[in-house]
Amino acid sequence: MAWINTIAIEDATGRLKKIYARITGPTGQIDNIMSVHSLRPHTIEGHMALYKAVLHHPHNKNPKWLLEMLGVLTSHLNGCAYCVEHHFAGLKRLLGDDARADAMRAACESGSYEPALSGKELVAARYTRILTLDPAGMTEGDIAPLREAGFDDGEILEINQVAAYFAYANRTVLGLGVSHVGEELGLSPNDGEDPENWSHG
């Protein structure tokens, strides 16, 4: 499951047991990307709070499928198969259109975004690619196409935070050898839950 020791759900005690109880999915699964934090339970809470705020907060304005697609793109660019598979499953569920989701994934993987992506989603993908591959090379001019496409500054922030979050998540997975083998893919938290709840032990 990972290159470091982790604590299984049946062996958890104290604070970790309480956290596991809060993040257990409908099938009783705790995703390996979360259980890899088990030796430092407070980092599960930090990770989950960021994840929920970036991808599932009710005040986000961008469509959830777009944020998931950008997560798939960022993860592909970072070489993180774990996050690609999990969030591609989420993208398919949100779109309800497997053919469209497959075309988006193929575009992300090929680097040829058109014609699978167009309009605002294409501009968001191009920004995400630059930020992921050359963050130090970005300039204020890289924001202009997003505004021209119709994104307001809050929506631009959401797009930025998806790429930033997945940079963190991808490195957590890749740096600790986290595997998705045996996991049910694409499960997500309760969308309406306040992410601030995850900052308390």
Image: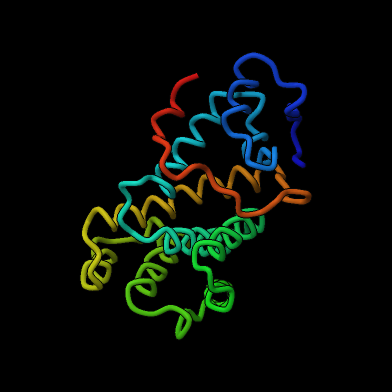
Where residue 10 sits, quadrant-wise, is top right
**Tally of numbered discs:** 0
101 or 171, nearer to the observer: 101
Q: Residue at x 65, y 21 (%)?
A: 17
2 sits to left or right of 190: right
Which residue is situated farthest in the top direction here?
A: 14
Q: Residue at x 45, y 21 (%)?
A: 200
139 sits to left or right of 193: left
Q: Residue at x 67, y 38 (%)?
A: 30
Q: Up-down: is 187 above or below 149?
A: above
Q: Quadrant of the N terminus?
A: top right
Q: Residue at x 71, y 21 (%)?
A: 12
Residue 94 in percent (x, y) is at 50, 62
134 sits to left or right of 169: left
Where residue 119 sits, quadrant-wise, is bottom left
Residue 53 in percent (x, y) is at 40, 42
Q: Up-down: is 79 above or below 183?
A: below
Where residue 150 sits, quadrant-wise, is bottom left
Q: Up-down: is 199 above or below 80?
A: above
**What colouring method underlies this structural image?**
rainbow
Residue 24 in percent (x, y) is at 63, 35
Which residue is situated farthest in the bottom direction here?
A: 115
Residue 66 in percent (x, y) is at 42, 64
